[in-house]
């Protein structure tokens, strides 16, 4: 993590990198986000194996499996051992006109006319990406005693304040394969079932950073209150296929939020 900033209270978002950059088609990537806001602490874990994604939010007793190609979502409700599922392509048109969709679109970095992520793949250069400017390249130590190459990007936004993001260019290709599906899935899930995979502030940073910047390992920006987060990255060489399956003792359920949207 980056050192504390004196003076203005700030949001700090950091990633610690462990393991190697092994191809994801032969390994499982696990990234755990440790999030703290106003005394609330939460750990959110993202699993990626090939084209399969899973996000665990223990604080909400929720896990969500999703496949970016088929656009199928499966939610595991761990409190009562139930699961729900829906296919985004079947409800997309109806979701566009819901109040939830309009609210989410209003805070999205890409308004609908700019091909917003909930309904379209993100463009290479969205309006907020133009706010970021590369500054300098440094070598910084990581927890395993080695050093990684990090590039500093800065942005100044009248509404969001001053932002600094340390990124690892060597992880750019891997990160591009992750950030798009995760951001779209987060917003689509909020629209469809009013649930979220990751905090809005984190998703906004992930969406707006230039794709060429690579994976953000530390982000700092001014806020009235202090919020901090760090993401631990690990590559597991022995995939666990059960991570992406519905437990055999879970029973199907129907979500009220999907009534009138599904076929």
Image (cartoon, rainbow, N blue to C red):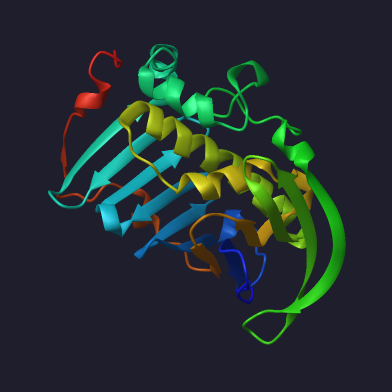
Residue drawn at (59%, 19%), measured in percent from left and top?
Answer: 112
User: How many numbered marks appear?
Assistant: 0
Q: Does residue 230 show up?
A: yes
Taking depth in this image into account, of 150 and 56 the one nearest to the observer is: 150
Place residue 126 in its image quadrant. top right
Tell me the quarter of the picture where residue 102 sits.
Answer: top left
Q: Is residue 232 above or below residue 51?
A: below
| Residue at image coords 25%, 13% | 260
- Give the side of residue 168 with respect to residue 96, left or right: right
Q: Residue furthest front?
A: 7
| Image x and y of residue 56, in percent | 36, 55
Quarter of the image with the N terminus in it = bottom right
Residue most toward the right?
136
Q: Residue 5 at x, y = what percent?
A: 63, 71
Name the image quarter holding the C terminus. Answer: top left
User: In the rendered view, would you say 249 is above or below 16?
Assistant: above
> Residue drawn at (52%, 35%), measured in percent from left and top?
184
Q: Can you see residue 72?
A: no
Front position in the image: 204 or 233: 204
Tell me: 210 left or right of 104.
Answer: right
Between residue 29 and residue 43, name the one nearer to us: 43
Tell me if 33 is positioned left or right of 205 in this view. Answer: left
**Horizontal and vertical percent position of residue 224:** 52, 55
The residue depicted at 20 percent of the width and 52 percent of the height is 78
Percent position (x, y) of residue 40?
A: 34, 62
Decide: is 7 above or below 202: below
Query: For this rendering, which residue is in front, 125 or 175?
Result: 125
């Amino acid at each position: 993590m980056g050192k504390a900033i004196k003076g203005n209270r700030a949001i700090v978002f950091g990633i610690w990198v462990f393991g190697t950059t092994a191809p994801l088609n032969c390994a499982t990537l696990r990234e755990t986000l440790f999030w703290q806001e106003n005394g609330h602490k939460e750990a959110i874990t993202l699993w990626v194996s090939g084209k399969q994604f899973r996000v665990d939010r223990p604080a909400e007793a929720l896990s969500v499996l999703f496949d970016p190609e088929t656009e199928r979502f499966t939610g595991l409700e761990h409190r009562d051992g139930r699961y729900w599922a829906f296919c985004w392509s079947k409800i997309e048109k109806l979701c566009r006109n819901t109040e939830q969709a309009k609210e989410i679109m209003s805070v999205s970095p890409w308004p609908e006319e700019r091909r917003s992520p909930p309904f379209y793949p993100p463009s290479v250069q969205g309006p907020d990406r133009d706010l970021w400017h590369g500054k300098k390249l440094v070598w910084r130590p990581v927890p395993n005693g080695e050093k990684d190459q990090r590039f500093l990007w800065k942005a100044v936004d009248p509404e969001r304040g001053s932002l600094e993001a340390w990124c690892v260019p060597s992880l750019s290709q891997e990160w591009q394969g992750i950030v798009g599906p995760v951001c779209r899935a987060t917003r689509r899930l909020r629209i469809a079932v009013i649930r979220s995979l990751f905090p809005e502030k984190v998703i906004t940073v992930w969406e707006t950073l230039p794709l060429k910047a690579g994976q953000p390992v530390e982000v700092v920006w001014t806020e009235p209150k202090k919020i901090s987060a760090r993401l631990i990255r690990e590559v597991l060489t022995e995939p666990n296929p059960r991570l992406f399956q519905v437990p055999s003792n879970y029973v199907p359920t129907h979500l009220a939020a999907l009534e009138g949207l599904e076929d």
